[in-house]
């Protein structure tokens, strides 16, 4: 009984990843010299996943939109997704602003900006110089399609994929063989994902060992109040804000979190939502969401719907001001909120993107010195785990919400999967990359 019990649970991905995270923390703390040398393990896993993202996103978007009965349906889904993204991001930013003003984690640090060395953040501030709204809009259109795929630039790939899908849809039934071929290619890519996910525990182990070894657990104690505020605020946003959206969609948030537990633990260990994007695409389709909605909303949400990053950006900006004893009026903070609505867009699902967005925010304001980023450099990796997990859950909920709003989700299948009646089969198929279920017929419109 007992050996089979352990064998059953140890075979689950989330258990293996959790073991990797704990082992990484222990090794990084007690043997930091070894821990710092394990960074390539985490980087290699992220690299393995990243090499698959461009073809998977391309095929998912093209197949999903090209198979829509009405091309106007794609525009409608896209518009609903954008409306949801803006509302969710605004709520996340506002919550972060309220919490950081109530608890004031930076108050009493009394940091003199003149004593801060800005050299450590030069790479981030340089990147932030190209983070303006115009730069962001220009970056959507690639210089060349081949270049976008070669460099793994997600937003240009999505843009080109949508144009190609619309063109295929307008050409009609004669493009069906090409779309079917792309669909078969997509299933093959998910098969490769299944192979790569076997090394996820090793990637989580290496990433966590390096983080703890380099920055030390003592760093956590020094900035404990800020970290506690961010983690609790992120949890509150997930439970109350995203929980309300799931209830409006007719599904349970807790059951959904249990359904994607593997992806949550991988994201926690790697601090990257990109690491689980392929699996999330499959799992949301298995849940009953129509493939066109999943293929359009989820990848786009990785760029436009970073709820966890939005919470972090507000709290981090005000934290730096508090630490330097910079008094910000209500109007100043509203300006910060407005700036963050722009700079928070385009944050990729990789570690460090939020830090670049933060540098862009401070660079666009005159009151808070950009050198204040040095205060966050040591703990950014720990903070990134909270925002990455929140981003992951937020984008999953966004896809379900838009699918429900569009009437493109099979509620009976969703309830069955979340209740565990199909959980084992779904998880196995999701990892195996088997073909997703047929797109459910359009139901009635639902208002959230």
Image (tube, grey):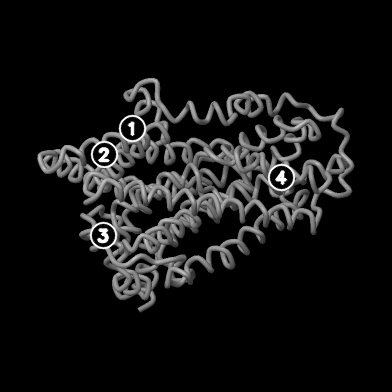
The answer to whether residue 278 is visible is: yes
Label 2 or label 3, whichever lies nearer to me, is: 2
Report how far apart the C-alphas of labels 2 and 3 lie in the structure.
27 Å
Label 3 close to label 1 by CB (< 8 Å): no
Give the residue at mark 2: 165
Left or right? Give the position of 168 relative to 196: left
Question: Which residue is most to the front?
Answer: 72
Give the residue at mark 4: 316
Neighbourhood count class around disc 2 (C-alpha, 10 Å): few under 14, some 14–19, many 20 upward: many
Give the residue at mark 3: 429
Q: Secondary structure at mark 3?
A: helix
Q: Is residue 432 above or below residue 54?
A: below
Label 3 or label 1, whichever lies nearer to me, is: 1
Picture residue at 44% right of the left edge, 51% below the top: 81
Report how far apart the C-alphas of labels 1 and 4 lie in the structure.
35 Å
Give the residue at mark 1: 160
Label 3 or label 4, whichever lies nearer to me, is: 4
């Amino acid at each position: 009984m007992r050996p089979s019990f352990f064998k059953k649970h140890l075979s689950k991905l989330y258990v293996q990843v959790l073991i990797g995270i704990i082992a990484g923390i222990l090794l990084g703390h007690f043997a930091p010299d070894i821990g710092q040398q394990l960074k390539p393990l985490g980087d290699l896993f992220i690299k393995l996943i990243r090499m698959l993202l461009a073809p998977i996103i391309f095929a998912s978007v093209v197949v999903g939109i090209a198979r829509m009965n009405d091309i106007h349906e794609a525009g409608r889904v896209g518009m609903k997704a954008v409306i949801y993204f803006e509302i969710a991001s605004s709520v996340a930013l506002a919550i972060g602003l309220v919490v950081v003003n109530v608890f004031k984690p930076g108050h009493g640090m009394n940091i003199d900006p003149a004593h801060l060395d800005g050299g450590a953040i030069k790479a981030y501030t340089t990147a932030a110089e190209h983070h303006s709204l115009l730069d962001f809009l220009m970056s959507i259109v690639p210089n060349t399609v081949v270049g976008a795929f070669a460099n793994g630039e997600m937003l240009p790939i999505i843009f080109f994929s949508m144009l190609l899908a619309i063109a295929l849809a307008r050409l009609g039934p004669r493009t069906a063989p090409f779309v079917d071929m792309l669909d078969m290619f997509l299933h093959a890519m998910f098969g490769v994902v299944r192979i790569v996910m076997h090394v996820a525990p090793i990637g989580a182990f290496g990433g966590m060992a390096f983080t703890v070894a380099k920055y030390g657990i003592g760093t956590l104690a020094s900035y404990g109040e800020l970290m506690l505020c961010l983690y609790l605020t992120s949890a509150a946003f997930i439970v109350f804000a995203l929980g309300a959206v799931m209830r409006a969609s007719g599904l349970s948030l807790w059951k959904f979190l249990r359904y994607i537990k593997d992806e949550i633990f991988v994201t926690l260990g790697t601090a990257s939502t990109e690491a689980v994007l392929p699996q999330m695409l499959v799992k949301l389709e298995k849940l009953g969401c129509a493939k066109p909605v999943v293929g359009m909303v989820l990848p786009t949400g990785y760029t436009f719907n970073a709820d966890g990053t939005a919470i972090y950006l507000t709290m981090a900006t005000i934290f730096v001001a508090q630490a330097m004893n910079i008094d910000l009026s209500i109007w100043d903070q509203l300006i910060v909120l407005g700036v963050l609505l722009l700079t928070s867009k385009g944050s990729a699902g990789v570690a460090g993107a939020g830090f670049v967005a933060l540098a862009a925010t401070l660079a666009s304001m005159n009151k808070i010195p950009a050198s204040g980023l040095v205060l966050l450099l040591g703990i950014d990796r720990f903070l990134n785990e909270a925002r990455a997990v929140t981003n992951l859950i937020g984008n999953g909920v966004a896809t379900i919400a838009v699918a429900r709003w569009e009437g493109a989700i099979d509620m009976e299948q969703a309830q069955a999967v979340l209740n565990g009646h199909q959980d084992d089969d779904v998880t196995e198929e999701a990892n195996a990359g088997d073909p997703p279920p047929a797109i459910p017929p359009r139901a009635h419109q639902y208002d959230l």
